[in-house]
Every structure is written in C-alpha cells, then in structure tokens.
C-alpha cells in the first residue's frame, strides 16, 4: 500500500524534498513507515529522528493531521493513502 510522508525543517532539508510517496506492506505501523523513510534518508536523517533508539522528543509525529499520541502512539496501523508527518517542536519567547 502507498502512504505519504511529509517532512519539515531539518528533516525536510535532509531528505531534499517535502513529500515522499512510500510503498509499505499491509499492516505497517507509523513507526515502520518512519523507519522506511530513515532508510531512504540515511545516517544523517537517523540522527535527527532517533535518540537512544526512540523517536526524538523534539519531534511531533502526526497521522492524518492528528498527533499520534492521541490515537494510540507510533504503533498505530496505517492505511492506504494515509499521511504521516514529522514536525519539529517550535519554541520561542
């Protein structure tokens, strides 16, 4: 099945494009999609996305415009046509 991955900020710069169309197996989770994207992006992207084996705490994982923490976390399954996004936290003062 095909899903879309949208990236922003340093992740977008690392991938050199904002949107990727990715083929993943049926029953894939959000985390599996992120791992697939990291495979495409290489070590530099891996360093941005993962910290100590987990998703970097400075990133918000979005599935179909909803924070995954509100819908079951990164282990939630994706469906054909779903859109996953990684957003950096925006901080300021």
Image (spheres, rainbow, N blue to C red):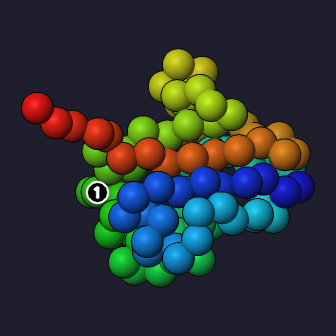
On screen, residue 89 above or below 32: above
- Horizontal side of 66 relative to 89 (left or right) equals right
Residue 29 pos. (x, y %): 67, 45
Is the residue 61 above or below the residue 33 in the image?
above
Q: Residue furthest top?
A: 70
Quadrant where the image shows the N terminus: bottom right
Residue lying at 59% horizontally and 63% vertically, measured from the top left: 18
Choose top left, top right, bottom left or bottom right for residue 9: bottom left
Where residue 12 appears, x then y in whole percent?
48, 65
Question: In terms of depth relative to the viewer, which is nearer, 56 or 8?
Answer: 8
Callout 1: SS: strand
In the displayed structure, would residue 14 be above or below residue 70?
below
Q: Nearer the viewer, residue 7 or 3?
A: 7
Question: Which sits in the foreground, 9 or 29?
Answer: 9
Q: Image check: 35 left or right of 28?
A: left
Q: Which x, y percent locates residue 52?
A: 27, 57
Which residue does the image show at 37% across and 78% down from the upper left?
Answer: 44
Residue positioned 11% across, 32% down in the render: 93
Which residue is label 1 attached to? Answer: 51
- Crowding near the residue tagged with mark 1, few <14, some 14–19, many ≥20 C-alpha atoms within 10 Å: few
- State the image quarter where residue 20 is shown: bottom right
Find residue 58 and report its image quarter: top left
Residue 76 visible here: no
Q: Is residue 60 left or right of residue 17?
A: left
Could you tell me if residue 52 is visible in this image?
A: yes
Q: Is residue 36 left or right of residue 4?
A: left
Residue with the most extreme left position: 93
In this view, 15 is above or below 55: below
Query: Where residue 60 sits: x, y (%)?
Result: 42, 39
């Amino acid at each position: 099945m095909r899903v879309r991955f949208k990236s922003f900020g340093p992740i977008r710069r690392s991938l050199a494009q904002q949107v990727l169309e990715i083929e993943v197996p049926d029953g894939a989770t959000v985390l599996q999609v992120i791992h697939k994207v990291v495979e495409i992006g290489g070590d530099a992207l891996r360093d941005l996305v993962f910290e100590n084996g987990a998703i970097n705490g400075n990133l918000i994982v979005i599935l179909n415009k909803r924070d995954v923490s509100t819908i079951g976390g990164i282990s939630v399954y994706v469906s054909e046509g779903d859109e996953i996004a990684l957003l950096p936290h925006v901080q300021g003062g």
